Image: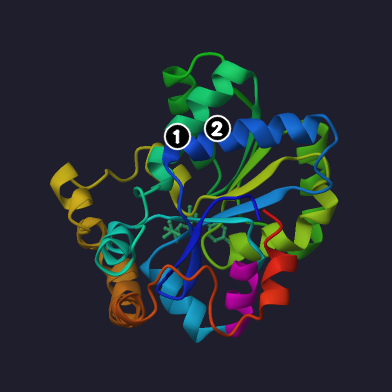
Amino acid sequence: MNGRRRLLVGGVPTTRITRAELAGMMVEDCLQARAGALTQPLIIISSNGAVIADFHANRAFREMVLEADIIDADGMPLVMATRLLCREPLSERVATTDFILDASAAAAREGLRFFFLGAKPGVAQTAADHLLDQYPGLQIVGIRHGYFDREDEAAICEEILAARADVVWIGLGSPIQESFALRNRARLSGVAWLRTCGGMFDHYSGKFHRAPLWMQRNGLEWLYRTFNEPLRLGRRYLGTNLPALFYLATQTSDAPRPKHVSRADADVRSHR
Ligand code: UDP
């Protein structure tokens, strides 16, 4: 374990960490990887209502989630549930669309290299241009769209290694991004972090806007997103919100790991 406290949030072992701490950890891990002290990249993913619902509904997805080194909480309802049910609640929400800003500032300062993988052709480039404007000195050393076949993955990993990326941001949606990270982790030795990021490239390409702050703070960002994409997200949230609420109410506690994972299993998996 990395000494970071994990809580069970809706049954998912979620790391208790702030955005600033996570950015600091990213810098530290990149320096370690460059020094050869990390044998393979760490996998950092986010939990939210959809992840919680899927974690319980789909065993293959659950196993992938349990392999992650850090699971941060990308959803205000998760933070609220821990405030009600845990002695030491989650410190704050780590929304990926916010965390990329902390990470970019730290990367520009420390000379870390990012690779963007995902979204439709051109989208991640527009997102990169936006971040480069905001963080002069940021190095985005490779960009590739997210529509490819399994056979292309070896070549994509070679491209990432040739670019000497420290952090690969993987925005392929769940569960494609988690399975890509796990399947290719061993091929990407030398990279420090594989960080899943969902629709983050779309967001920073200007396609969508964030919900007003009052909605973000009150756990209503999902409602705002549904108004923007009613068909796709309406269907998703209908299927996931109720189960997520149920698991948040019944499986949120200070315990560090889910009941169905043995201590031995969990210790092997959670080497951080
Ligand atoms: N995507 C991709 N390859 C695929 C399927 C999806 O690159 O094979 C991208 C898609 O273009 C979008 C992102 O993955 O940019 C999925 O975003 P979504 O909103 O579903 O993720 P969330 O943020 O909700 O996890």
Determine the image quadrant of residue 113: top right
How is this picture coloured?
A: rainbow
Q: Nearer the viewer, residue 101 or 122?
A: 101
Image location of residue 253, percent across then percent down: 39, 71
Q: Which residue is mark 1?
A: 20
Q: Is residue 138 visible?
A: no
**Residue at x 63% of width, y 60% of height:** 68
Q: Which residue is mark 2?
A: 24
Image location of residue 268, percent across then percent down: 75, 67
Q: Quadrant of the N terminus?
A: bottom right
Q: Amino acid at mark 1?
A: Ala
Magenta stretch bounds: 59-66
Q: Is residue 80 visible?
A: yes
On screen, 167 above or below 196?
above
Circle 2 Cα neighbour tier, 10 Å, few/some/many (<14 / 14–19 / ≥20): some
Prevailing secondary structure of the magenta residues: helix
Q: Specify whether 118 is left or right of 149.
A: left
On screen, 17 above or below 232?
above
Determine the image quadrant of residue 259: bottom right
Marks 1 & 2, CB-CB < 8 Å contact: yes
Q: Amino acid at mark 2?
A: Gly
